[in-house]
Image (cartoon, rainbow, N blue to C red):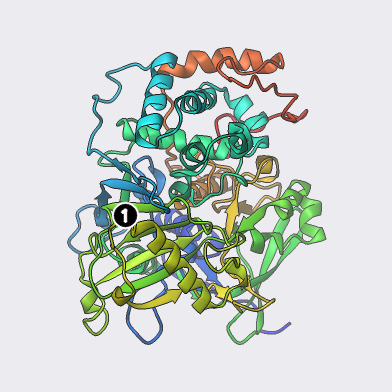
Amino acid sequence: MSGGNVGLRRGVSFGGRVAVLGGGVAGLSAALELAERGYSVTVFECHELGGKARSVPVPGSGLPGEHGFRFFPGFYRNLTDTMRRIPFAGNSNGTWDNLVRASAYRGARANGQTDMVVTFRTGSLLPPESHMFGPAEVIALITLASSTLAHVPFREAFYGARKYFTYWSSCDERRLGQWDLLSWNDFLQAERMSLAFRSWFADGMVRNLAAMKSKDASAHSVGLILESTIWSSLGRGNEPGGTVDRVLNGSTGEKLIDPWTAHLSALGVDLRVGWTVTDLAVENNAVTAVVVSDRSGTSHRFDADHVVSALPVERFAALLSPQLLAADPGLAGCARLRTEWMNGLMFYLRKELPVIHGHVNYVDSPWAITSVSQAQFWQRPFTEYHDGTVRDCLSTIISDWSAPGMLNRKTARECTPAEIAREAWQQIKAHLNSHGKVVLTDAMLHSWFLDPSITAPGTPAVANTSPLFVQHPGSWRDRPGSRTALRNLFLAGDWIRTDINVSTMEGANAAARQAVNALLDADGSPLPRCALGVLYRPAEFEHLKEADRERFGLGLPNLYDPDKLTPESTGRNSGPVLGRGPGLSHDA
């Protein structure tokens, strides 16, 4: 091993030295909180700062691209608080002022079926908290919306509404000890239902909310994010100024990541890009050094008082040495956590195409495609990025890389980039060009660009360097909190136990705040702890959850569950349920 110890950037520092491993949203969030508190911080990032939230410009063209379009629900509180503290020229609220409202959602259908359009109001039809909802009213409202907006058969709409309310009225112990063990599809008995039911209740907006697949994600994860979204649409649980759906008014790099990293540099944070963490040296219940390799492949030992790992789950799992697991055996579960592919595909258009003022879900797309037309939201015209011929970007996400295509019958994993683009384009056209309308034509297409995280596409060696952590059924048991058994190692990332629970920028930011608070506790620091926002809990349902807690303890089903599923029938864990809220870890 060569290279020796790597020095930290020196400056005024009232705290210790901290190595932050990973420069995605979690790592940048932790670095900001620590730098503001006087710690000397070095961030190691092997690829690019911003992680999965980064922009990915098209090489040689100047055109902006995304790993996946960004989405900022109104109920985000942690990430948006951070955004307000990142200066941006001309903005009084920093990068937060770069958020703009998306006012609608479209569930586009193929084969001539009726599209579903939902308009998001700036405020609730009812003043927040002015109306207390009861079980019968909630079930009736969801039934009505499902049967009228999504054309779900009435009996199935009523069943789905009761299942939704089953989750809403479930205690935390049941959510984690029963529903987390089921997939959302199994919770809804979706395979027995009509296509209309599956498209609305099982998939529907789930793809847009967290790019999840209902057959693979836990019922607790999907139920929690849907619950928060519905309350958001009713004007409850949103941060001040928050609306149901928000996007940035430009590329993520320009409007968030670049200002963020510039601010960190101004605070004295040492950002080292191209440095890969290869090992954690462990001795006496502590990390004694971080082993990193630089761009040339030279290995170095980096000494720090504290280590915050903000690495993606698959990269952290690769560091689980016998020494590390001996110090904290509970970390072994990290190796059992799963990832899936969710990657962006940009279609650059010769004309602006505002399909709808928000996100589009191509409901019948086997590749689970979603999109947003970006030009309508961006301050800077697309013509300024290139040669003036590109006027819009239909920024899409492919969330299912394992299903046969609609036309070529190949999975996205099996396709070359050209085949991926051609099939995705045809799937989108099949949804938009319906009912006698021609919305999208081949003549509109200027070019396309696939996320370069997909490597060796079209070959047996195809891989994804930026996969997405997925909350598969039962995964809560294996997910760690932010504080480990090692006295100076702390964990952040969207795969750590947090209140929001789902793989999001908000979850990554919340986990970073948890990690910093745990570090401050371990350091005996008198400095203020990071504020930690939590998801909204409707007061009128708390008594129902208390009653359900007693029923769960007795092995009885939730009172409103039409299927009367008992904890035992869904494999309740005989061990204790960790956490004190729906996704809230001990570190919170």
**Quick check: can you spot residue 511?**
yes
How packed mark 1 is, by other alpha carbons closer than 10 Å (few <14, some 14-19, many 20 or more), is many
User: Dividing the picture into quarters, in which one does residue 438 lie?
Assistant: bottom left
Q: Quadrant of the N terminus?
A: bottom right
Check disc 1 and give the amino acid type.
Answer: Val
The residue that label 1 is drawn on is: 247
Whether residue 585 can be seen here: no
Q: Which residue is more in the foreground, 507 or 370? A: 370
State the image quarter where residue 121 is shown. top left
Tell me where residue 478 appears, x and y as whole percent: 70, 45
Residue 246 x/y as whole percent = 31, 50
Q: Position of residue 197 (x, y in %)?
A: 50, 36
Q: Is residue 462 left or right of residue 114?
A: right
The quarter of the displayed image where residue 463 is located: bottom right
Query: 381 or 437, which is in the foreground?
Result: 437
Image spot of residue 247 (x, y percent): 31, 54
Foreground residue among 521 and 101 = 101
From this view, report whether residue 213 is shown above or below residue 150: below
Instruction: Identify the residue shown where x is 42% and y is 14%.
Output: 136
Query: Which residue is at 33% across, 60% downward?
Result: 433
Q: Residue furthest left?
A: 90
In this picture, residue 400 sits left or right of residue 536: right
- Apparent side of residue 533 relative to residue 455 in the rendered image (left or right): left
In this rendering, the count of numbered labels is 1
- Classify 158 as above or below 290: above
